[in-house]
Image (spheres, coloured by chain):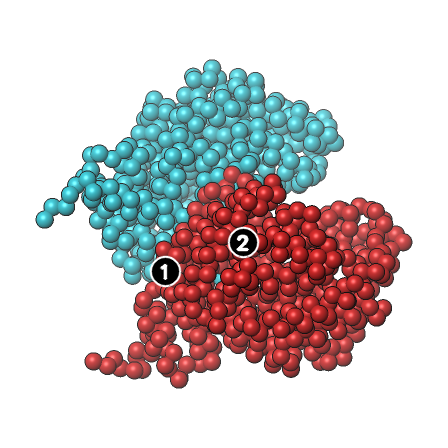
Chain colours: A cyan, B red
Amino acid sequence: MIPPVTGRSSSDLELVRDWMGTLADLGGAAGMLGWDRETLMPPAGAEGRASLMGTLAALHHRELVREDAGDALAALAEDDGLSGDDAAAVRLATRARDRAVRVPESLVREISEASSRSVSAWVSAREADDFGAFSGPLAVLVGLKRQEAEAIGVGDEPYDALLDEFEPGARAADLEPVFAGLREALTPLVAEAAERPARTLPEREWAFDGQRALANEVAELVGFDLSGGVITTSAHPFTGSPHRGDVRFTTRFELGTPVSGLSAVMHELGHALYEQGFPGEAVRTPVHDAPSLGAHESQSRFWENQVGRSPAFWERIEPIMRRLFPDAMQGIDPALLHDSAQAVRPSLIRVEADEVTYNLHIALRFGLELAMMRGDLTVDDLPGAFADGMEELLGIRPPTTALGAMQDIHWADGLFGYFPTYTLGNLYAAQLADAADEALGGIDRAVANGEFLAILGFMRDRVHRHGARRPTRELMLEATGRELGPEALIAHLERSYLDR
Amino acid sequence: MIPPVTGRSSSDLELVRDWMGTLADLGGAAGMLGWDRETLMPPAGAEGRASLMGTLAALHHRELVREDAGDALAALAEDDGLSGDDAAAVRLATRARDRAVRVPESLVREISEASSRSVSAWVSAREADDFGAFSGPLAVLVGLKRQEAEAIGVGDEPYDALLDEFEPGARAADLEPVFAGLREALTPLVAEAAERPARTLPEREWAFDGQRALANEVAELVGFDLSGGVITTSAHPFTGSPHRGDVRFTTRFELGTPVSGLSAVMHELGHALYEQGFPGEAVRTPVHDAPSLGAHESQSRFWENQVGRSPAFWERIEPIMRRLFPDAMQGIDPALLHDSAQAVRPSLIRVEADEVTYNLHIALRFGLELAMMRGDLTVDDLPGAFADGMEELLGIRPPTTALGAMQDIHWADGLFGYFPTYTLGNLYAAQLADAADEALGGIDRAVANGEFLAILGFMRDRVHRHGARRPTRELMLEATGRELGPEALIAHLERSYLDR
């Protein structure tokens, strides 16, 4: 018997909308608990919080794989009469559900337990610089993640299925030439830029209260809506949003310099402005999101590097800083502020790397994790390969594995395919900056005139308001007029670091 | 076919434990979102937060009424082999599930919508002092709450079923003589105490930073574990705990006096110390809780009034205050601090009432809401009855309904049967203080010697560590050696306000 098409479809849509709303709310609740864990939760709460978040994750999974939702999604996928947003939401929700359904629950549990063990081992092994105490749990996790990738079965090789979680549509085979081009262009650029003398601020104290006030003023200046936002501090800056109307980011301040704190603020502001710009009409659906981590990172890198590292930016910020820090600012001009934020030096730690060397850290990690997933590199050989790669790309060899292959938590946590999204963000940010230059008659000009809202307006129009409706590649092609490539970023870095 | 008994029972227990854990975690997540709403959430987040909390409430209800959990609970109720804690948890969970199952979902939804409308009407009607704009929605809500009470069918009359939600086991017929005794004893006591001259602190500024530091020091002094706790500020002080190891309370500070802030801190500390003292072995079960709101309030009132209003307390706190407020404390001695916290004056607003008049505000509300539920008082007659009651009990007549029957949010929100728990807390607190006096050779002596941890130890032993294992009446009979009555409170008030 064929059910009546109209009635069926509209009740399917109702069911799917409710279901998507519940998933969004459960995700938002988990986000709130995670935010609080990093900012306010007292230490004794760790165990209880883990249990609570585990329960929410289990309920989210239970909801995600609901059979009636699967049936309704399948019916709606055949329906030509859906609105564009409903069709996009159905497509995105189907994708998420399919991924969840394909991985057997037993494997989900195995991976969850293996990554808990691996993170624990990593914490102590890194402290003791004893890779041998970490390699066993890591090898187990690598094996399980390959199984997961096979089960998901997206793309042409296991790595693709993992990458696809963070960057839907991206494939290793497409990224390899991009990273090869980056490595080729960046290596000489780093060598040349690193020879330039670095200027630093004189040793002074920059009170936290003043830095907090600065963060707030800068946030308002660039268009962050504080009536729907919160800014606090945490050990590692991050941005989150439990639901529309509440977008939060953290930063951290150093007493000895305001520059690193301000960079962190600009970075997180990029993420936060994006979240505030998601299409309100798509709230509680997967359209009310970024299409990928790379797209999200394009926004943070745009505001941090393309806007926040320009000489015009420091010209604009300097009077605010002089008002907030009348003593510490004595003898400091905008050029010195700018130069102190621009030093290029090959260094060991990715998260502290400058804008020029940063993508070489990622290129290294991308190559290594791809080789592991392809079975071309064993976990035991990882530390040596990491050190060799650092030497080849940056000319420095990590003195310990703790400062080398055990530096980041990502692999310990099973996050393979995550690293490339950082570089994708940098590449898209540079392409977006070129497009903004064209549309606004120069970002620098706009910044010099204090037209931050015009820059935000450009980004709202080209990126934010589309949410996750289109895949990142399509969104960015439309927004920048170009396919993904290293050229725009390389040109930006040459302009900023060699031609001055 | 009869299933094998042993296997059945152990798998039932496993199911029920999982189910209770999920309920506890969902409750904890909702608590966290509520906490954040009152402390950190930006204004634009209100709508999204309501949706998110609504989803969690719906999932909690869906989980609570699960049929398989009902079957397992029924089987376990017949099982004599359960441990004491499992049996208590099964009893408490069955009680909660039964209440939820008995009320039809349509009525739940009607009440939820009616109370939303009633609260909205109350907000604007109170502002305009226009009871006519509130009486309609309130009357609807009263009718629905009576239906709910009939559906629950606990106790001898509708009011009992509502009261039983907040104070399991309590019955209107038992409370009526208690309140009658209180009214009789308090009316002359208020008249006499109010004639005494009141001493107040000189007009000075008490910096918020100092008051925050004072709150922290006092919290540590009385034994609050800050490694598992958080103290912040909010418009209305409250205590909450998303899960074990994370107990939070808020307070508020007035610039013109440190006394009201410190009283609020002592009150919330009582709640917070209780939460930290719940039995850890019963975590994620309904045993890891207070048996009733009255029991919970007994702890806040004990620390606020029985400890925090004693002359010995101010003697002990004064050096800390002098260190934190060297200027503001000039010319202020412990006796003046104490006296400024002790003024007795009949006043209109319940939440600002002193310790002596407070319970008359509750007696009035208890009588009125009981009469409404019995059908002896219509909503239209409520404002007059409220004003007459204030005049009779406190000798002052509210000049407006906004300052009278529309003063509190409770009725607008459908919280009938909630008010008496405040007075139950005061009564139990006084009885506990008598027992502590006996056990410790005087609370005042212990406070004077700084033996706060001995007082906390008494409370941990008699009340906290039992969680919700026993009903409040039984717990308090065991802890204080007496049945509930007004005598201990009256004696405390006479000692504190007349005999000095």
Q: Position of residue A245 (x, y in %)?
A: 48, 39
Q: Residue at x 48, y 72 (%)?
A: B156
**Farthest residue in the right direction?**
B331
Q: Residue furthest left?
A: A1
Which residue ends up furthest to the bottom in the rendered image?
B80
Q: Quadrant of residue A155?
A: top left
Task: Judge the density around disc 1: few (<14), some (14-19), many (≥20) Cα neighbours within 10 Å.
Answer: few
On the image, numbered disc 1 is attached to which residue? B104
Which quadrant of the structure image shows residue B272?
Answer: bottom right
Indicate which disc residue B379 carries. Answer: 2
- Residue at 42%, 74% in the rendered image: B90
Q: Nearer the viewer, residue B305 or A204?
A: B305
Mark 2 neighbour density, 10 Å: few (under 14) some (14–19) many (20 or more) = some
* Chain containing mark 2: B
Q: Secondary structure at mark 2?
A: loop
- Asked whether disc 1 touches disc 2, contact meaning CB atoms under 8 Å apart, the reply is no
Can you say which quadrant of the picture contains the C terminus of chain B? bottom right
Q: Quadrant of residue B439?
A: bottom right
Image-based side of A286 in relation to A258, left or right: left
Q: How far apart are labels 1 and 2 at the CA level?
A: 25 Å
Q: Looking at the picture, how far across and down is residue B57, in whole percent?
A: 43, 55
- The residue nearer to you, when weighing A7 against A381, is A7
Q: Chain of mark 1?
A: B
